[in-house]
Image (cartoon, coloured by chain):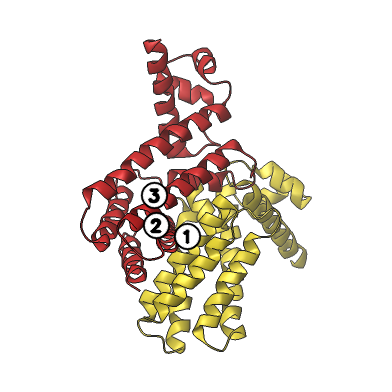
Chain colours: A red, B yellow
Amino acid sequence: MRDRSATRRRILDAAYALFYRHGYARIGVDAIAAKAGITKRTLYDHFRSKDELLAAVLDLHHVLAIAQIERWGQRVSGATARMIDRVFADLAGWAARPRWSGPGFSRLVMELADLPGHPARAIASRHKAAVEAWFARELARRKVAAPQARAREIVLLLEGATALMLIHGDRGYATAAAHAAKQLLVR
Amino acid sequence: MRDRSATRRRILDAAYALFYRHGYARIGVDAIAAKAGITKRTLYDHFRSKDELLAAVLDLHHVLAIAQIERWGQRVSGATARMIDRVFADLAGWAARPRWSGPGFSRLVMELADLPGHPARAIASRHKAAVEAWFARELARRKVAAPQARAREIVLLLEGATALMLIHGDRGYATAAAHAAKQLLVR
């Protein structure tokens, strides 16, 4: 049972690495099985289809991303402006990594833009909503006025900065977005 | 010669429709030739490769998009806040169209995220930079202070609103983004 769960995780990690790097359409189950070091038959024993595998990858990365985000709140206990700076600095640091391939969830939604009913779209929407709700709770905890409206502005700026850093390869977009988010907070 | 240019445009329109709807990876030259009502041989007589065809599609749509944006400035001559509302309302209206498949240029960059040297990436970056520069000029013309910084905030919010409307199917993100852009203008 332990082996089975380790194999499952290995498949998920291989699928994540390949989907994240090359997108969903260009990657087949053969490549995922090869990267995980298993047969295609073993892969299908764990996941009935590439779609089901994608859904499991997204569920896992939703959990990992939320855990990461929660560390932002814990690590920066001082002024809210400092938390905002940290959030956008982490975003810029992530974008500066070699082989950074843009925002995973948003990129997938763009790739599946013509398939609104695809199960991955619903998972991505839930994920983004959870991030926005986390910011709203964190701002409320810090006694910021209108925390939901401010949280929405923060996710708009995060989303815009991520896309524009990918497009231009320029971290200045994260700095500009952090500045805007802080200006909107103190109004 | 007139026929040749009409055929070229027919290929570009077919390619745009298919790439926009289904992304770049999933569409082959066969499908484009079929949609344009020509043979693959004729297509290759105009464009040496799918990459070259994509570059031509992007160049054309850059010109069309900039023409559209310039109408924003001409049509809304009053308060800058009214222009901002119009820009985001147009964005929301575009996103509400049936079969809207997200932002064309950004979506393509996401699809080619692992290929930073792809010629389409450079065209997309130039396009986005031209849009940002247009806003900076328009704000300067309207005597807004720090027009370049404000223009960058507007494109951050436009980019974020477009992605989040695609992710959630909720036009409220455009309204929130317009509100934030206006708040940042009057500071």
Have a look at marks 2 and 1 and say if they share a chain. no
For marks 2 and 3, give the CA distance. 14 Å
Q: Are marks 2 and 3 in contact (CB under 8 Å)?
A: no
Pointer 2: residues within 10 angstroms few (<14), some, or many (20+)?
many
Mark 2 and mark 3 on one chain = yes
The percent position of residue B178, horizontal first and vertical second, equals: 51, 71
Q: Is residue B30 left or right of residue A182?
A: right
Please give the name of the residue rendered at 55% of the width and 80% of the height, measured from the top-left corner.
B83
Badge 1 crowding class, 10 Å Cα cut-off, few under 14, some 14 to 19, many 20 or more, is: many
Tag 3, which secondary structure? helix
Q: Which circle marks residue B160 in the picture?
A: 1
Disc nearest the viewer among 2 and 3: 3
Give the Cα distance between marks 2 and 1: 7 Å
* Residue A97 spot, x, y in % from top left: 29, 46
Image location (x, y in percent) of residue B48: 60, 50
* Residue B28 sits above or below residue B105 on the image: above
Residue of label 3? A134
Q: Is residue B150 above or below residue B17?
A: below
Look at 50% across and 66% down and name the residue there.
B176
Select label 3 or label 1 by which is in front.
3
Q: Is residue A70 left or right of residue A8?
A: left
Q: Chain of mark 2?
A: A
| Residue hosting label 2 | A158
Query: Identity of the amino acid at label 2?
Result: Leu
